[in-house]
Image: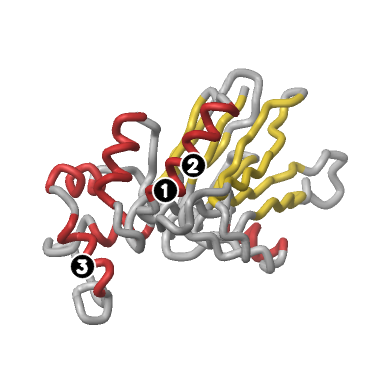
Amino acid sequence: MRVAFLADIHGNLPALEAVIADLKIQAPDQVVLVGDQINRCPWTNEVLDLLAELGWPAIYGNHEYIIARIRTPENFYPFTDPLRYPTLWWTHRQLTSHHLALLYQLPAELTLAYPNLPSIYVTHGLPGNCYRGFLPEDSDEHMMQLREQVEANYIISAHTHRPMDRSIAIDAGIGRNEKATVRRILNPGSVGLPYNGDVRAQYLLLESQAGNWQPIYRQIDYDLDRL
């Protein structure tokens, strides 16, 4: 069993097309979009058209959440100011009404369940907060406080544009002869706008091995001149 996670595409069509070509070779059983499919690069409609053809399940990131609410009563400060956030407002003007309606309907999170494998909780940022993400430099104690409401042992979280793989052991309790539960927090990195010094398009494959998940991080070259 293989599941691919694509995050932070940010309207970068050349990067997305290169990742799709690699996915045809890797042949995952499922592909999941972890938010911020849009904005910052100019191909937002083209990216959303392509993703709609593929039909992959998706959640919203902070960019989808904000842009879908521009020029509606649900918009909120400071994103009500087009001079302060010109790219958000520009992208909103470019989007078709059909795409805006689809963005508005995206869920905040997904829980994926597969036979005889640990469940996977997918969120763009922190559980319940798409504006902040898990950082590699966060302490174990801090990370545990942030994911207390999540029962799944595997958490896929994006937003920081930096790949991450952290395992955290939860104390089973003082005086108990119980084995500690391990939570694993994984960030796929960014398809369209990496922040880790590697300009290649980046995504994550989870592959089932002996009843567990093994992460495989992919880095894909694409046409930067076109971008």
Q: Among all residues in the image, which is located at the extreme front?
A: 225
Taking 205 as reference, is 5 left or right?
left
What colouring method underlies this structural image? secondary structure
In which quadrant of the rendered view does residue 41 lie? Answer: bottom left
Please tell me whether mark 2 sits on a helix, a strand or a loop.
helix
CA separation in Å, label 3 and label 1 = 23 Å
Instruction: Name the residue located 54 percent from the left edge and 60 percent from the top edge.
Output: 194
Query: Going by the picture, which residue comes out furthest to the top?
Result: 115
Name the residue at 53% across, 32% down.
23
Corner quadrant of residue 51: top left
Q: Which residue position is annotated with label 1?
A: 14
Q: Amino acid at mark 1?
A: Pro
Disc 2 to disc 3: CB gap under 8 Å: no
**Residue appearing at x 67%, y 67% in the figure:** 138
In the image, is residue 153 above or below residue 43?
A: above
Q: Which residue is mark 2?
A: 18
Residue 210 image point, x, y percent: 77, 23
Earlier in the chain: of badge 2 and badge 3, it is: 2
Nearer to us of marks 2 and 3 is 2
Please tell me which residue is depicted at 26% across the width and 66% down the height of the picture. 88
Asked if 133 appears above or below 148 in the picture, the reply is below
Q: As drawn, is 117 to the left or to the right of 99?
A: right
Which is nearer the eye, 164 or 26?
26
Q: Looking at the image, which is closer to me, 224 or 100?
A: 224
Indicate the amino acid at tag 2. Answer: Ala
Check disc 3 and give the amino acid type. Trp
Front-lying residue, 21 or 116: 21
Q: Earlier in the sequence, mark 3 or mark 1?
A: 1
Label 3, on which residue? 89
Assign the N terminus to one quadrant of the image: top right
Q: Secondary structure at mark 1?
A: helix
Is the Cβ of the residue at disc 2 closer than 8 Å to that at disc 1?
Answer: yes
